[in-house]
Amino acid sequence: MWMGCCITNLPDAAPLFGPQPEFKVTSILSLPGFIKKDLSAALQFLRILQPYLRLMSEPYDYIIIGSGFGGSVAALRLAEKGYRVAVIEQGRRYRPRDFPRTNFNLRKFLWMPRLGLYGIQAMTLLKDVFIFHGTGVGGGSLVYAGNLLVPPDEVFEDPAWQGGNWKAKLAPHFKTARRMLGAAPHEVITPADELLRECAADIGKGDTFHLNDVGIYFGEEGETVPDPFFDGQGPDRTGCTLCGGCMVGCREGA
């Protein structure tokens, strides 16, 4: 069961849980206009939320916070073992046509509710780290640009990693993730990549320029084919059109 905390994603599911209660407040008419407006919105919110509160009152063995790579896999494995699992996601469910075409469309791209922005790219600043993460059903998979990176050795050698030998411990799991995500070398160097290469060379770091592996299917451009990775048992794949939409949410069969 998926539950979105962003109410715009929920009303179409309400009929699944029976008729919704009617809220009536007779004294609202005597309140100032701006209070009436806010109270009416709150009552509408409660009316929509009611069936989901009933749903959440049911017993669950596990509640997963977040529906990204980690949360969705954890939920799947638990459900496969027969546990009752709820997944809670603060963002909405996106269809391909819902994604912004440019990150200048701040309303659809950035997640900053205090500014009225409910997009897919969230940013969280903590004391020692600045986190870019996704918001919406799918979490970070909506906006990770398809890049599949394995940390360099110096990361694993950091003393903050207690227990030692974490590179070897995690290697088989990185291998599994790469297989499941269809990791492939990026095949195209764009003008932007060339500019990055030049900048790296200018500061004496030209040897660090490389193409990342990505979770993108480079088949016939725009052509949808049966799953090429798991003997046809996975979802259909569409050849990348090189539109760059992986930075703002892929519209092309991801």
Image: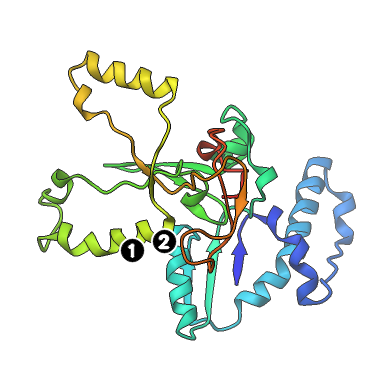
Q: Which residue is rendered at x = 65% and y = 72% of the image?
A: 53
The N terminus lies in quadrant:
bottom right
Camera-side residue of 94 and 3? 94
Mark 1 highlights which residue? 176
Taking the image as shown, residue 204 lies to the left or right of residue 194, namely: left
Mark 2 highlights which residue? 180
Dot 2: element: helix
Q: Which residue is rendered at x = 17% and y = 18% of the image?
A: 204
Amino acid type shown at disc 1: Thr
Marks 1/2 in contact by CB < 8 Å: the verdict is: yes
Camera-side residue of 195 and 132? 195
Camera-side residue of 232 and 55? 232
Above or below 250: residue 162? below
Q: Which residue is rendered at x = 82% and y = 72% of the image?
A: 21
Snapshot quadrant of residue 46:
bottom right
Dot 1: element: helix
